[in-house]
Structure formats: structure tokens, C-alpha cells
Image: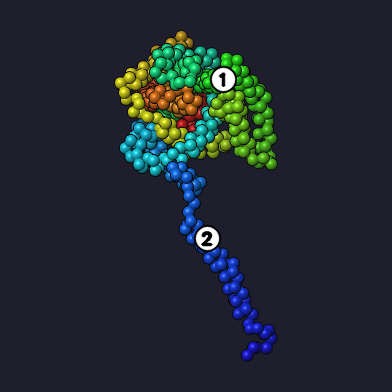
Amino acid sequence: MSGAGEPEGGPPRSRGTARALVGYGLLVLLPVALALLMLRHGVGHPVQETAGAPKPAEPADLAGQVLVAGAVVVAAAGLLGLVARAAGQSPVVGEILAGLLLGPSVFGALAPGVSKEVFPAAVTPVMNTLAQVGVVFFMFLVGLEMPLTMLRRLGGKVLSAGHAALAVPFLLGMFIALRLRGDYQPDGVRTAPFLLFVALSVSVTAFPVLARILSDRELIGTRLGAMGLAMAGVGDVTAWCALGVVVAQVRNDSPLGVLVAVAEVVTFTTVLWFVVRPALAHVLRLLESRRGGVLPIGMLITFFVLICAVTTNALGVHAIFGAFLAGVVMPRSSRTVRDFAHRTEGLALWLLLPFFFAAVGLQTRLQSVFSLSALGVLALVLLVAVAGKIGGTFAAARLAGEGNREALGLGVMMNCRGLTELVVLNVGLSLGVIDSRLFAVLVVMTLVTTVATDPLLRLLRLDRLPPSPGGGHSPAEVPAQAQETAGARQP
């Protein structure tokens, strides 16, 4: 019997429950049942695949594989970086070694099945792409940390010594390249780019790694340390320009094409320095005064770096040159730029550059170095690389009035190659200027000369040098940027 006031057809709560059950059946259970029927039908009638055609990796699977590879790469780089630091070396030495150990020479040889699981074929292109992005932003940071004030302060002595540290090994490298071209020059590559690239590859100095080593040795605030950093800066700028010429030669068949490409890049650089640089400083000051304004400044800087990289790549020179120029012209006094560099270096140094080291390692077969002929080539390359760097720097420093120990110390500093050399070698390999055998030889040369820098500096005991009789800069007069450079970023 219904109570007073209850409408016919039962209590409202009962009717609401019934409607909810009907709705649940129609809108949930029925769609699920139909989906299960469709799944059963699809499983029972598989789509026939073309025989022999490999099944492409699904995006979700590929993302998972990249994450696994990334975890292994970062863990190996971090662990060996700690081992290198404990051994008195820069962490970048351990990170380079980690990349080599993860490649086919060690990990691939000892555990080929596991290596293929961790680094399947589909992952390698993704790793290479991430590595190239990392190198672009690393080159931006290198350009940003170029000691421009220091270069102006130390003047002509640094310019001549820095160029001598590049020119002498470059000349000796040309002789090596002439000796190697019969066996190591790739088919289809013209002789001029091969000679220039090999000569350049034994001439490079790693400015970022050197800055860290000098900081660890407490030489960063001394006159000699500042001079070494400034010379490395001169060498780096010149080497990147020379690399741009080599890349232009590879990508242009005619001398006129090379000249046009170089002229375009020179024009672009001039516009960046004299027009974009002051305009960029003004825009950043304006945006910073508005405390965020209408534009996210970090995105503006990122866009600028990328558009510079795209521009130099389109002009026939590698994208890393544009990123380097973006760093050089970026206002150093801007707090936003410093904050952007601080945020960018974490991603670049802790993730993307370990990917770069792993990509180098996956392309390096150290077994090709251990033949009798290859060991002879490695010994020749090491002899020329070390003698050219140390000898050229020593002679230039002595002519500039430095003592024997100071001049030898500067030569040892210039012999540090590290990450900068690997970037150059990777460009050469990707362009096909050198083959994988010579690439492996030059990678080993890079590792040996980088590892040797710190012990040789300790042996020379440069921190106990007496004051220079020729005057010069005291530690207090060394520009603050020299000390900021080493402390700002760990290579």
C-alpha cells in the first residue's frame, strides 16, 4: 500500500535505481560486450603480413625501448663519471669511456643478446637525434662561455699563441692525411675535404673540459690559467670556423660554391654581432623589466638558438656553428640568460650528452684499432697530435716571453681535446669524410690526450710557479669571467 503523497508506480528511490541499472547496462555493459566480440573476431582472423617484412615497432614500444636505453646510458655515464673523478680525472673522461664500453667493442662483444635488447636497431636513430639536439645546446653553452672579456684583456700574446697551437698541429696533420689517404680516404670523398678534416681533427682543444681541469687544479685564478683558457678560446673559435669551411667544401662541389657558402656565413655572423646582439640585449632588458611580460623569455632564447642553427645548416655549414654563434652574441649580463643556461645545462649534460657519448660508442669499433697496421697509424696520429700541440704552443709562448715551465704547461693545456674533439669527429663521420676505422683511431687519440692532461699538469706543479718576471696579470687582475666559466658548468 502506497503512503500518502507517493505517486503511483512505486517509490521514487526504486524507480531511480531501476533507471540507473538500465543505463549502466546500455551504456557500459553493452559497449564492453560488443568490444569483446570485436576483439575475439579480430584475434580469430589475423591480418596476413607480407612474408619477410619486419614488423615496425609500435610508438609505445619504441618509447619504452628509448627509456630503457636512456636509463642504462645515464647510469653508466654517472657511475664512470664518479670513477673518473675519484681517479683525479674530469667526469667527462668517464662519460666518454662509458659510451665506448656500451658500444659493440665491449658490451656488444661480451653480451650481444643483451646489447641488442637494450639498444635495438629502432632505438639508434632516436638516440642519434636526441644526441644532435644535445650537441646543439651544448654548443650554445660553449659560445655563451667564451671568455670574450679575457680575450680582449690578454691581447696579442694570446692571439698569436692560440693560433700557433692550432696552426702547427694542423700543418703536421696535413702530412698525416697525405700518408693515410690511400688506405683511409672513403670512396667518393674528394681529397681536399679529407686532408682538411684530418688536419683539423688533430688540432682541436676542448675549452670546456680544460676549464674544469684548471678549476680542479686551482689554476683558474692564476695568470697562466687565464692565459691557457684564453688561448683555448681563440683556438675553439678558429677551429669552429675552419670546420665550417670543411663542411662547406663537402657540401659544395665547386670552389665557387664554397666561397659563396663561407661569404654567406661571414655575413650572417656580422649581422648577428653588429645588429642582432645589441637588439637582443635591448629586448631582453625590456622583457625583464616587465617581470615576465607577455613573452616567455626562455622560449624566445630557445627559438633564437634553434633559428641560428637552422640558418647555418641551410647556408651549407653545420647546425652546431649557428648554435655556437647564438651563444657568442647572447648578452652575458642578463640574469634571464644565466638562468636559461643553468636550466639548459642540466638537461644537456645529464641526459642528451650521455646519449651523444653512447651514440659515438655505438659507432666505434675498437677492434679495428688493434691490428698491427692500425696501431701504427694510432701511434703516428698520437705523436703528431701531441707534438704539434705542445711543440707549437711551447715555441709561441717562449717567443712571447714565457719561461720554459710556463710554456710547457700551456702546451699541455692545449693538448686537452675531450668533448669538443668528439663533436668534430661525429660531424666528419656523419658527412662521410672519414670512415669508421679512422674514426675509431681518432676517438682513441682523443681519450688518451684528454686523460693525459691532468696528470701532466700535476707533474709540472704549475700551482707553485713563482710570479712571472715579465709582469702580466696577477690573480686579482684575471677577469672574473675566467672563474665563472669553470664554475658554471661541469663538462
- 428 or 386, nearer to the observer: 428
Foreground disc of the pair 2, 1? 2
Total marks shown come to 2
Chosen colour scheme: rainbow
Q: Is residue 33 visible?
A: yes
Looking at the picture, which amino acid does disc 2 mark? Met
* Residue where numbered disc 1 is placed: 252
Residue 419: horizontal and vertical position, in percent? 45, 28
Q: Residues within 10 Å of mark 1 (few under 14, many from 20)?
A: some
Quadrant where the N terminus sits is bottom right
Residue displayed at 37% across by 29% down? 365
Q: Is residue 92 visible?
A: no
Looking at the picture, which amino acid does disc 1 mark? Asn
Residue displayed at 59% across by 69% down? 26
Residue displayed at 47% across by 18% down? 194
Residue at mark 2 to residue at mark 1: CA–CA distance: 57 Å
Residue 65: horizontal and vertical position, in percent? 45, 44
**Disc ID at residue 244:** none
Helix, strand or loop at label 2? It is: helix
Residue 93: horizontal and vertical position, in percent? 40, 30
Residue extending farthest to the top is 399
Helix, strand or loop at label 1? It is: loop
Mark toward the start of the polypeptide (2 vs 1): 2
